[in-house]
Image: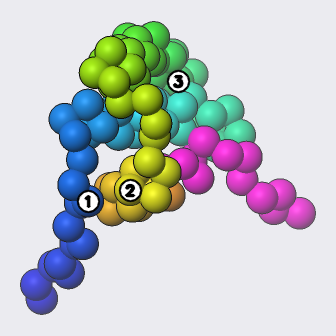
Amino acid sequence: MPTPELPPLPALTRAEGELIDRYLEVLDLLGRINPARGGHTYGGLRAAQALASRAAGLRDALALMHERGESELHGGTLGRALRTLDGERRARLVSVPPDDT
């Protein structure tokens, strides 16, 4: 069975693409660290160690946008890019899951 066709990414500047990539990296790491989701301390430790450099990459992406005069984040376009790249599922891993009781 063929894989479903993903919607195309919206047109982004290089800096916006970098912002989206770095943001999703940080989300993934925060999801791995989330203590409410269980797991092992070693995996959380490794994710926390990587978080500092990924957060710096996110900061640098935003700084580059600012330096280039990209003073606004276009939420609609960036939101579509995040949804296309599975950002909603990845962001849910950061939140506290519902109570099982």
Is label 3 in contact with label 2 (beta carbons under 8 Å)?
no
Label 1: element kind: loop
Q: Which mark is residue 88?
A: none
Which one is in front, 84 or 13? 13
Say which element carries label 3.
Answer: helix
Q: Is residue 64 magenta?
A: no
> In the rendered image, is residue 54 in sight?
no
Which is more foreground, mark 3 or mark 1?
A: 1
Front residue of 11/89: it is: 11
Q: In which quarter of the image is residue 49?
A: top left
Q: Mark 1 points at which residue?
A: 10
Which residues make up the magenta segment? Answer: 90-101
- Say which residue appears at 39% left-offset and 61% top-offset: 80
Mark 3 crowdedness (10 Å alpha carbons): few <14, some 14-19, many ≥20? some
| Secondary structure category for the residue under label 2 | helix
Does the magenta stretch mainly form a helix, a strand or a loop?
loop
**What amino acid type should be assigned to the residue bearing mark 3?**
Gly
Quarter of the picture containing the N terminus is bottom left
Residue where numbered disc 3 is placed: 44
Q: Are marks 2 and 1 in contact (CB under 8 Å)?
A: yes
> Residue at 44% of width from left, 48% of height from top?
74
Q: Which amino acid does label 1 sit on?
A: Pro
Q: Residue furthest right?
A: 101
